[in-house]
Every structure is written in C-alpha cells, then in structure tokens.
Image: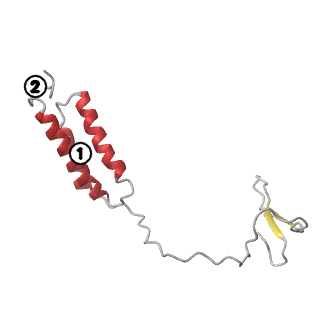
Amino acid sequence: MANERGKTVVPSSSSDSAPSQTSTTTPAPHSQPSSQPHLHNFSHPAPPFFPLPPLQTANICDLTLLGNLHDRLVTETVRYTVEQLEQVNSACMSKVWEMRACWNRNEIIREVGEVFEEVDSDVREGGAIGDGSFGSA
C-alpha cells in the first residue's frame, strides 16, 4: 500500500500483543524492462462492455415441497431392493447435477419428483408390489 509520499507501507508481521508497527520502504527503481505488458498500453481498444444479468445469491426453496418429496421417496421405496434404490438414486442425482446452476430449488425438486415417477413406474412394471422383490423371479 502506498502512502502520499510514494513510499510503500508494509504491516509488521509481529505476533505479540503490542500495537502493530509499520515500516516504510521506497519502491525499487525500474531499471530493467518488465516481462509483463504495461497496464497503461492504450494501443489496443478495451473490449466492449456487456452487462451481466444480476447475480442471484439466495436459494429459493420451499421446505414443504422438499418435505413432501422426501416423504414420497421414503414411503414409495420401502420395499425396493438395493439395486432399485441405486437406480432411483442415480436418476435423481443425475437430474440434480444437470440442474446444479439453477438457484430456484423448487424447480429442481419438481424435476426430481418427475424423474422419480418415471423410475418408480419402471420398477413397478417389473414385478409385483408387496413381495419385497420388484423384478425378481
């Protein structure tokens, strides 16, 4: 950090409880050409400015909607085999990964619910419900 006299102020690295001390040093003269391009080279025009959309920093998540999906997953997969649970997990997590940039978690919850419905209907078509082994012979 430079002060008004052009000298660099460097905070002390002292770790004791005494008030922090600063030392001042004079910047080294530039006798050698720098390997970095000069920041004030105006021979190239600046790139055009494109405004970015506003950054949304808050997640939108309806906890009731999330709770309903959780309850549905728990109750409807109670008799699934490990392989069937892995199939549900894989399909749902693929959808979550696909929508990872979406800040509106309600959209993700709805999409995961739809994916679960598809997988659940496939599993139920493969075997009788209630025997504890959908799809097994």
Q: Position of residue 79 (x, y in %)?
A: 16, 30
Instruction: Say which of 45 and 59 sits in front.
Output: 45
Q: Which residue is mark 1?
A: 70
Amino acid type for the residue under numbered disc 1: His
Around disc 2, counting alpha carbons within 10 Å, would you say few (fewer than 14), some (14 to 19), or many (20 or more)? few
For marks 1 and 2, the one nearer the N-term is: 1
Q: Quadrant of residue 83?
A: top left
Q: Which residue corresponds to the image point at 76% horizontal and 70% vertical from the top-left?
A: 38
Is residue 42 left or right of 6 when viewed as pictured?
A: left
Residue 39: mark in rendering: none
Q: Which residue is mark 2?
A: 131
Q: Is residue 113 above or below residue 57?
A: above
Q: Quadrant of residue 121?
A: top left
Q: Position of residue 20 (x, y in %)?
A: 77, 61
Q: Position of residue 119 (x, y in %)?
A: 20, 40
Element at label 2: loop
Element at label 1: helix
Q: Which residue corresponds to the image point at 76% horizontal and 69% vertical from the top-left?
A: 1
